[in-house]
Amino acid sequence: MAKKRNGRQDAIREIVRNKNVRTQRVLVEELKKQGYDCTQATVSRDIADMGLRKLPEGVYVLAEDLHLQRMVSELVIEVVHAGNLVIVKAQPGTASGIAAAIDAAELPEVLGSLAGNDTILVITRTDEDGAHLEQIISKLCDPRS
């Protein structure tokens, strides 16, 4: 049972990070696409266990990503990737705080980050991880997109 729940919660984590999930019903449908047969009540318990929050824009965000989302939405100007390197441009003087938030989120794609005054270099495992991280940060910049 616990193993199944952990796998489902890992799937929820991935879905919430990659899609704009606004309702529990949508989350149940996404889980079913991945082979998880669960009810809305089960997903509701998972949401509570995982500490998911709903942003004012109406989308779910992981508790560990909430601080990152706030930092990114207020301070990030641009994000681009080149292979497994992701460059994040930010307001002057804020890069180290954003880098710390990226590190604290423990994103599986991220190997580490370096911060200057207004620029962060994030190193990911693969080129695909770089593209995925760019997508995640861009989504956090504008959760409606």
Image (tube, rainbow, N blue to C red):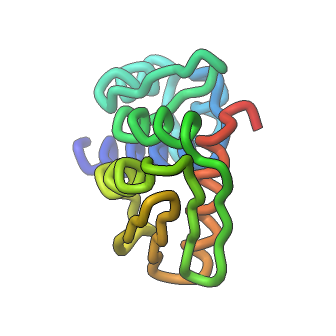
Query: Viewed as shown, does residue 39 lie left or right of 131?
Result: left
- 15 on left or right of 70: right
In-front residue for pair 62/66:
66
Picture residue at 62% right of the left edge, 62% below the top: 134
Residue drawn at the location 61% of the way across and 77% of the way down: 128
Q: Position of residue 37 (x, y in %)?
A: 52, 38
Between 82 and 135, the residue placed more toward the observer is: 82
x and y percentages locating residue 46 in the rendered image: 37, 29
Residue 143, relative to residue 114: is it above or below?
Answer: above
Instruction: Give x and y (percent) for residue 74.
Output: 56, 34
In the image shown, does 86 or 54 lie closer to the viewer? 86
Left or right of 47? Residue 29 is: right
> In the rendering, at what x and y percent does residue 55 appear?
55, 21
Q: Residue at x 55, y 47 (%)?
A: 91
Q: How many labels does the image show?
A: 0
Q: In which quarter of the image is residue 88?
A: bottom right
